[in-house]
Image (cartoon, rainbow, N blue to C red):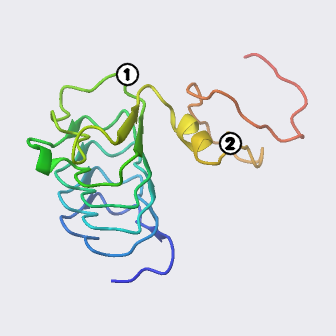
Amino acid sequence: VSFEAHLTIPDSVTSIGSYAFAKTDIPSITLSAGVTTISSYTFYYCTSLTKLVIPSSVTTINNNAFGYCTALSSIYIPLSVTTISASSAANSPFYQAKSGCAIYTRHTQKPSGWGYYWYYRTTSAGMSVYWNKTLVDYKASYGASGVSVASTESAQTYDVSYLNHAVMPSIISKKTDY
């Protein structure tokens, strides 16, 4: 299956089934905030997939989810991921992924629900794990320069306690403590 452009999974999708995108040339994907599970072999042999940010709704990543993703240079795993199945080296979600793939996570250490071989490639060497990193840290490492606030018209509230810095629009001229 050939994908010409970026793919976005709709919010109504909660689980991505086994082999859903296996052996496709998908270059990039946005997983919706509804996805809670990335099943075994979901992106198996997706040799064009380069980067992936897993949304904070995901709690489980199963065996070989990204196996043989030979172009996957980076991935962000949020705190919500409490289970990563990896009962053997060959079942690691990243088995045979790109050498030098960088894994960023907000976790400060390996959670107990992450299998022993959770980041095994062909050896544990060749994968870089960056602990206690925010999504902002991840994006800054890959070209983004922080978080930009585009408009003051929205009344939505966001948790920004994890931010290292933010770029505010020039319309904001005074900080008020509440």
Measuring from the top left, give residue 37's x and y in whole percent: 25, 51
Crowd tier of the residue under label 1, counting other residues whose Cα lies within 10 Å: few below 14, some 14–19, many 20 or above: few
User: Tag 2: residue type?
Assistant: Ala
Secondary element at tag 2 = loop
Residue 130 sits above or below residue 60 on the image: above
Measuring from the top left, give residue 73's x and y in whole percent: 44, 52
Horizontal side of residue 43 vs 39, given as left or right: right
Residue extending farthest to the left is: 87
Could you tell me which quadrant the N terminus lies in?
bottom left
Residue extending farthest to the top is: 177
Picture residue at 12% right of the left edge, 50% below the top: 90
Of residues 25 and 59, the one nearer the viewer is 25
Horizontal side of residue 116 vs 34, given as left or right: left
User: Tag 1: residue type?
Assistant: Thr
Q: CA distance from mark 1 to mark 2?
A: 33 Å
Secondary element at tag 1 = loop
Residue 47 sits above or below residue 145 on the image: below
Instruction: Give the mark nearer the N terminus: 1 vs 2.
Output: 1
Crowd tier of the residue under label 2, counting other residues whose Cα lies within 10 Å: few below 14, some 14–19, many 20 or above: few
Q: Quadrant of residue 15?
A: bottom left
Q: Which residue is mark 2?
A: 155
Of residues 115 and 161, the one nearer the viewer is 115
Q: Which residue is mark 1?
A: 108
Picture residue at 83% right of the left edge, 41% below the top: 169
- The dot on residue 14 is none
Picture residue at 32% right of the left edge, 62% below the top: 13
Measuring from the top left, give residue 53's x and y in whole percent: 44, 50
Picture residue at 35% right of the left edge, 68% below the top: 47
Tally of numbered tags: 2
Horizontal side of residue 154 vs 23, given as left or right: right
Could you tell me which quadrant the C terminus lies in?
top right
Measuring from the top left, give residue 22's x and y in whole percent: 25, 70
